[in-house]
Image (tube, rainbow, N blue to C red):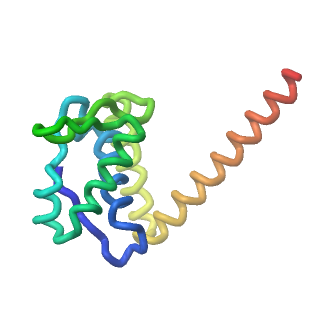
Amino acid sequence: MEFQLDRGSGVATYLQLVHQVKQALRLGTLRPGDQLPTAREVVEKLAINPNTVLKAYRELEREGLVTGRPGLGTFVERGVGGAGLAEHARLRRGLAAWVREARDAGLDQEDLRALFAAVLSDTALSDGQREGAGREGAA
């Protein structure tokens, strides 16, 4: 795994590292048993403070996603998310087709982000309303 930093994002560096590990776990590019780069390797590649890397790894460890093994490194303990890799691949193909269709319709990158964020927000809201209605009906 190679970390990338977006220094203009406004997101703390350690959180960018945490998010990238979680994304790799969700996409299956990191799996239980895999070793994360050493803090030293990350520091050398990204020119950041070693404490930043250690903070990110401690956060991942606190969440139960990785375990530090003294003298050996930091290893993935478990994945995140619900769907398996086959389901991810199927959904990714469908999303790629949707993106191509949206681009053909004239949408650019920012349009796609805005549309996707709106749909995520709408579905989260409607899912929350359905859950609330289910609880009310059970009472």
Q: Position of residue 103 (x, y in %)?
A: 40, 64
Q: Position of residue 132 (x, y in %)?
A: 79, 36
75 horizontally vs 133: left or right:
left
Residue lying at 42% horizontally and 30% vertically, measured from the top left:
83
124 horizontally vs 26: left or right:
right
Between 43 and 24, the one lying in front of the other is: 43
Q: Position of residue 74 (x, y in %)?
A: 20, 41
Residue lying at 86% horizontally and 29% vertically, measured from the top left:
136
Q: Position of residue 44 (x, y in %)?
A: 10, 65
Task: Count all numbered tags in the image, as a single digit.
Answer: 0
Hey, which residue is sitting farthest top in the picture?
A: 138
Hey, which residue is sitting farthest front in the picture?
A: 70
Q: State the quadrant of the C terminus.
A: top right
Between 116 and 39, the one lying in front of the other is: 39
Residue lying at 37% horizontally and 53% vertically, measured from the top left:
19
Between 16 and 128, the one lying in front of the other is: 16
117 horizontally vs 51: left or right:
right
